[in-house]
Amino acid sequence: MQTKNPEALTDLLQGRRVLMLSGHTHTVARYQHPLKDGFLHELVAGAACGSWWTGEKDVFGIPAALMSCGSPRNYFEVEVADTSFRLTFKGIGLDSGHQMHVWVAGHDTIDKQVADLDTVPGGTVLATIYAGFDQTAVWMQLDDEAPVRMNHVKRVAPLVARVAAFNKSNVYPTKHSTRLPLRSRPSNHVWQAQVPLNKKWHRIRIFAEDACGFKADGYYLFE
């Protein structure tokens, strides 16, 4: 949120529970603005066209349109009851349970062509949780081990790093597609953890929740 007189605005809203919905940036973001009494929660809701309906087209002619925060094109469902609310992210054309992208360093040979990913230490796990923000609690569970808390980090989402690298090397755009205008900008909703390399693992589970009723659950399966 950007305004010339933020103090006057927060003074006006004291004692209220406010949900502010905004857009225009073609990104997804959430911010909790401090109030002495009550709260002001801002949701930047992304866009149904993603990054301006650009990028590599699939067999149906639909462009990837990945947004610079690492989220797919989307909309939100907002449930309001009395003075509480619940936010649900919905990726367009995706199952409702698809709430994140999980990436593990060294597990996809395509990343040998992406300098920003090829240099990430082995065993690093990055979870791009599309509707998460800095107050979302995120855990990683390896097989049946006890879950561990993931760290919120400011870094480029792995899928964005791939697109930016392939744009730079002229791999993208291919014929009949348009260039997806992504640059290597840090995302607000990436979490990081480390997988021990001294043991063979079969499954990673990532799960998240926060005080706004947001919940997400995702998996990464090893070979």
Image: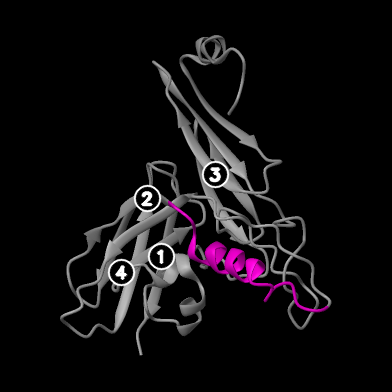
Crowding near pointer 2: few (<14 within 10 Å), some, many (20+)? some
Considering only order in the chain, which callout, 3 or 2, is on the residue closer to the N terminus? Answer: 3
Please name which of the two marks, 1 or 2, marks the residue nearer to the observer. Answer: 2
Q: Amino acid at mark 2?
A: Val
Q: Amino acid at mark 1?
A: Asp
Asked if disc 2 and disc 3 are in contact, CB closer than 8 Å, the reply is no
Say which quadrant the C terminus sits in: bottom left
As measured in the structure, the alpha-carbon distance from the residue carrying label 4 to the one carrying label 3 is 27 Å
Check the image and name the residue furthest to the right.
176
Q: Give the mark count.
A: 4
As measured in the structure, the alpha-carbon distance from the residue carrying label 2 to the one carrying label 3 is 14 Å
As measured in the structure, the alpha-carbon distance from the residue carrying label 3 to the one carrying label 1 is 19 Å
Q: Is residue 82 at least partly visible in the picture? A: no
Q: Amino acid at mark 3?
A: Ala
Crowding near pointer 4: few (<14 within 10 Å), some, many (20+)? few
Please name which of the two marks, 2 or 3, marks the residue nearer to the observer. Answer: 2
Q: Which residues are magenta?
A: 155-175
Which residue is denoted by mark 3 in the rendering? 29
Residue 121, disc? 4
Residue 170 or 84: which is nearer the viewer? 170
Asked if disc 3 and disc 1 are in contact, CB closer than 8 Å, the reply is no
Say which quadrant the N terminus sits in: top right
Is disc 3 placed on a helix, strand or loop? strand
Residue 192 or 99: which is nearer the viewer? 192
Image height of 5 relative to 114, above or below:
above
Considering only order in the chain, which callout, 2 or 4, is on the residue closer to the N terminus? Answer: 4
Q: Give the image location of residue 36, x and y in percent.
A: 39, 15
Q: Give the image location of residue 142, x and y in percent.
A: 25, 73
Q: Amino acid at mark 4?
A: Pro
Image height of 50 relative to 96, above or below:
above
Please name which of the two marks, 4 or 3, marks the residue nearer to the observer. Answer: 4
